[in-house]
Amino acid sequence: MVIDFGSFYDFPHLLDRMMGEMSQPYTAGGRQVAFPPLYIGESEAAVVVRALIPGADLADVELTLTDKTLVLKGELKPAKGKYYRQERPTGPFQRVVRINMPVSAEKVRATMRDGVLEVLLPKATAERPQTIHIESR
Amino acid sequence: MHQNQMPDRCGMAPRIRPAADFVEREDGFHLYLDMPGVRREDLVVHIEDDELTINARTSHQLCNGERVHAMEFGDVEYSAQFALTDTMDKSRIAAQLANGVLVIFIPRREEQVPRRITIEVL
């Protein structure tokens, strides 16, 4: 049997999610996913990671890029006062994104807009398929 | 994040109630609503009689030609209603949208500060 540990390998997290669903079978509609929720897209030139972190400034989020992973880390602080209702998440959070392809670390760009963090990781040029022109002799 | 954040991937954006915090401080009440991805021009805050209504549509612009590896959120339509009580000053409500959080400040009504009635002993 061959197990494909491809890019963005997420099996442990999926297993956790499945176990969570089993313990709460009657939650209609959606489910509580890990915070912050992510979107990972890959185009020919770059990998883009977006996360919904409402209430956080770019300074509140710490981004660490190693060879294989991108780590999002931060903390959401609660407001002061007397709470009558609290549904928004608070406290520290962390998510690890495996990126099993070479990205050019010096060109990584992170932006924050309307509570949505966007990290653009351009692929290393060697990774991009290059067409080789074949001449006839 | 609110548990209904996960949308269907086809059809119209699902309508969900944003996660909300309601906090009382000395100056009045503060309502925090998580609305990531909402631009100011897409946000409608409406007060009619004793009801505060908030409607907003997100514009994430996801999966435009990309290969999608993970998608844990998508475009939604936020919708929320709150009842205002007599202790709140409806004429001075202020709303502010920053970092994807809508903060609505509702001041306490001055004349509604509970009066203490002194009882004289006859």
Image: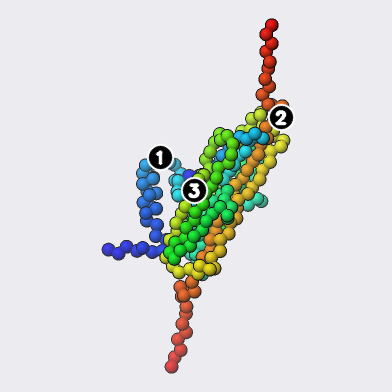
**Which label number is shown at residue B110?**
2
Image quarter in which the C terminus of chain B is found: top right
Mark 2 vs mark 3: give the one in front. Answer: 3
Q: Is B67 on the left-hand or right-hand side of A3? A: right
Disc 2 chain ID: B
Expressed as whole percent of the image width and height from the top left, the position of residue A132 reads 46, 82
Q: Residue placed farthest to the left in the image?
A: A1
* Residue lying at 36% horizontally and 51% vertically, measured from the top left: A15
Disc 1 chain ID: A
Expressed as whole percent of the image width and height from the top left, the position of residue B106 reads 66, 36
**Coloured how?**
rainbow
The foreground one among A82 and B10 is: A82
The foreground one among B87 and A68 is: A68
* Residue lying at 67% horizontally and 8% vertically, measured from the top left: B121
**Which label number is shown at residue A26?**
1
Q: In the image, what residue type sits under mark 3?
A: Pro
Expressed as whole percent of the image width and height from the top left, the position of residue B73 reads 50, 52
Disc 3 chain ID: A
Of helix, strand and loop, which one carries label 1?
loop
Q: In the image, what residue type sits under mark 1?
A: Tyr
Residue B5 in sight: no
Of helix, strand and loop, which one carries label 3?
strand
Task: Name the residue that disc number 3 marks.
Answer: A92
